[in-house]
Amino acid sequence: MFYTFDILGTIAFAISGVLIAMHKKMDVFGILIIAFVTAIGGGTIRDVIIGETPVSWMKDMNYTYVIIASTVFAIVFKNKINYLRTTLFLFDTIGIGLFTLVGIEKGIEANLHPIICIALGTISACFGGVIRDILCNEIPVIFRKEIYATACIIGGVFYFIFKLLPIDNNLVFIISGLVVITIRLLAVKFKIALPNIYKN
């Protein structure tokens, strides 16, 4: 289940990277690079922090194949995507939901404190998008007032709460991931944001 979530998150983030790269009118090489950094950026930082080297995607070629396949898929079917912004948002949201749980599990495997595990999950989920946005000359979403990293943190807290209950671990994964995704969707739909300390 852990590996499946990691692959699904990789696909989701790779496609979100392709979409924003195409929106920026990059060439094929640029699109592929943005897909890669979006999909593996957060996980790479996470693995380096916990001392797991070579990082996971270097030890398993399936990640590279999945990113390339996702890139080709998104490029081939780009004309089928009528609502680019909505589609980008959806894949990005699915990605943070999946990668939050993957990062938390990595922390648990390393016998780290739950708070550190949640931090790792947030890094896994958010920092691929941070690198993507910086390379695409955008202010990263995590640094704006939108609910983004906060959704990952809340989902991580719920993950550890659910772990205390007599619930199957696979179900804990699914429910916690849905918590992240739901919070992000509701925050955007109802324009819920963190307080702004700056006056207009």
Image: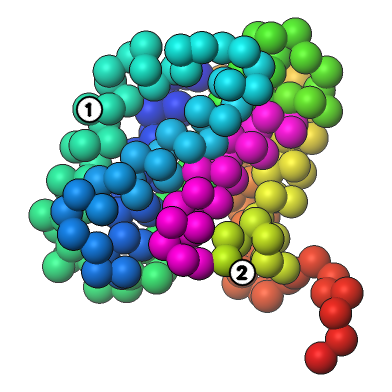
**Residue 162 numbered mark, or none:** none
Q: Are marks 1 and 2 in contact (CB under 8 Å)?
A: no
- Residue beneath disc 2: 188
Residue drawn at 64 percent across, 37 percent down? 123
Q: Residue furthest bottom?
A: 200
Residue type, mark 2 in image:
Val
Q: Nearer the viewer, residue 150 or 34?
A: 34
Verify whether residue 126 appears in magenta.
yes
Mark 1 / mark 2, whichever is N-terminal = 1
| Relative side of 46 to 37, left or right | right
- Residue beneath disc 1: 65
Say which quarter of the image contains residue 90.
bottom left
Q: Nearer the viewer, residue 178 or 152?
A: 152
Using the numbered discs, state the Cα–Cα distance from disc 1 to disc 2 in whole angstroms: 32 Å
How far across and down, in percent of the image, does residue 133 sit? 49, 58
Q: Is residue 125 visible?
A: yes
How far across and down, in percent of the image, does residue 46 sit? 60, 27
**Mark 2 packing: few (<14 Cα in 10 Å), some, or many (20+)?**
some
Q: Where does the magenta region start and end?
A: 118-138
Q: Is residue 165 visible?
A: no
Residue type, mark 1 in image:
Tyr
Q: Secondary structure at mark 2?
A: helix
Above or below residue 22? Residue 96 is above
**Mark 1 packing: few (<14 Cα in 10 Å), some, or many (20+)?**
few
Mostly what secondary structure, the magenta segment?
Answer: helix
